[in-house]
Amino acid sequence: MAQLLPLMADINNMALRYFADRKNVYLFPWYIADVTISDDISALLGKAMRESFMVIDKGFVTAYYDFDSADELCKTACNKIISDPEYFPLVIKKIYEYSAALDKSSIAISALDASILSSSELIDIYEKYVKDLRQLRVWGWIPPLVDGITDSYLSNHIQKVFTEHAKTQGKEARALEYYTILSSSDKQSEVQQEEIARLAVLRSFEEHGWLPALKDIAEGNFSNFEARHPEAFLRIQQHLKEYGWLTYSYVGPLMSLQHFFALASDNMKRGGIREQQQSKQEYYANLKKEKERILIDLKVPLEIQRLFEISAECMFIKDYRKGVYQRSYVAMDNILTEIGTRLDMTLKQVKFLLFEECKEALLEEEKEEYRSIAQSREKLCCYHIKDGMLSIFQGEECRAVIEEFVSEPVKDEGEVSELKGTIAYKGEVRGIAKIVLTVEDIAKVNEGDILISSATNPDLILAMKRAAAFVTDMGGIISHASIVAREMKKPCLVGTKTATHVFKDGDMVFVDANNGFIKKII
């Protein structure tokens, strides 16, 4: 077996610190994002994150970053956008350009009959896909970088200059409230688009008089739904085909019929379908008007207006490009499944191989050795990236490397009872903490609970609707949790770093998103 990349001879973990963890992650496609921020991004910003280390233990990833170089990267991106009026429009242009290219490629890949392709053709498609994804990924890193990894640099800067201006207008007391409105995107997020479309599906059922189908949806009775309500089932399938990728995240699954039923049933419990649809559609129009009113009333200078426009666009496009990534992951399952068939591997096992390894296994008939490697990595693997060079380990070698890199395991910080975070949407609320990391955790969330997650995704929307507030380990002011909190008008703290480790299910907690902290009260 060829040595793909040289092993690191000088392992030095002095700068590495625990960043975050999350469930349901495989090697592919996670490692591609880390390669771009450790290598490709230097072409845009003149520097990159120097070092990172990831441990994937049975699908649970723990990330360690070199915070010093990561912070410098974030500051560089932020300063470039603030100081150069032409740079941010270029970033947005490139993200849309490469998003369109990747979406077009994903549609073509999904339509292929992979079984009739030669092994060389499969590899060529995979290679082009990785190239296309890296092109988008490198530009797509800019919005989250300006949001910050350890500190929200852009948000902090905007809040500072805006608060100073608000003082001159006698509005300092409401500066945070106004900031939240002005920094929000007035474009419909894809989560909102899905809900509006879902409400349209339910309205069409009402208009057609398909009341038995609605009754089954409300009661969660999806058994034999297709046979009993074929027309309604077809309409739902069309919806799932268009929006099913929203719940895919990194490894799937696509949105299921059961998941649609749960979301639709929640809609039906919350009142009139027409009224909900209208409210959703009016939200962004009203937000745009409110932003215009505040800008005029406070006589906000053009330069600060530009900063708010950047923040709002970052909030939208960060979520948008994530959707493009997810649709591409869904499409690539078509190719990776066929590669797995030829290598006698499951789709999951193929996703524990690097592209170069898949190529070697498939074209040079090294499948038995790589099958053994993939099986080992399913249980435990880790990779180290330093100065753009990636090294990957599994088995006993992996355990030895982890011991060297990770001086102490990530601990549940039981002695800590209070954490600070970045305010994404203001408010105060008390409730019972529920740790929500995957779709399976949604069932334990009741109305009024406090949802605590490493980072939220669209597949957790049902839990977010039930929760009274959101708290996350990762993310900044333009994260998914921030977007949804503003749409739902629920208190939200992001970037607490360790909330999922400090708090546990059943803790009574107080979320003070006016002052930026969460604490245990019982």
Image (cartoon, rainbow, N blue to C red):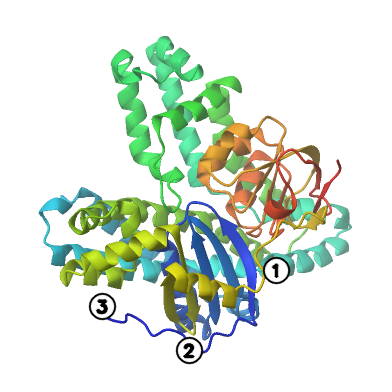
Image location (x, y in percent) of residue 138: 45, 72
For residue 151, the mark is: 1
Badge 1 local density, few (<14 within 10 Å), some, or many (20+)? Answer: some
Residue 4 in view in this figure: yes
Image location (x, y in percent) of residue 453: 63, 49
The C terminus - image quarter: top right
Tell me where residue 145 sits by quadrant. bottom right
Badge 2 local density, few (<14 within 10 Å), some, or many (20+)? Answer: few
- 89 is higher (above) or lower (below) than 320: below
Q: Nearer the viewer, mark 1 or mark 3?
A: 3
Residue under label 3? 1
Label 1 vs label 3: CA separation? 43 Å
Residue under label 2? 9
Left or right: 428 as drawn, with respect to 32:
right
Residue 77 in view in this figure: no
Q: Secondary structure at mark 2?
A: loop
- 364 is higher (above) or lower (below) than 371: below
Tell me where residue 169 sits by quadrant. bottom right
Q: Secondary structure at mark 1?
A: loop
Label 1 vs label 2: CA separation? 32 Å
Q: Nearer the viewer, mark 1 or mark 2?
A: 2
Residue at 52% from the left image edge and 40% from the top image edge? 439
- How many circles with numbers are drawn on the protein? 3
Badge 3 local density, few (<14 within 10 Å), some, or many (20+)? Answer: few
Give the amino acid at mark 2.
Answer: Ala
Mark 1 or mark 3: name the one nearer the start of the chain.
Answer: 3
Q: Secondary structure at mark 3?
A: loop
Q: Residue furthest front?
A: 396
Left or right: 203 as drawn, with respect to 433:
left
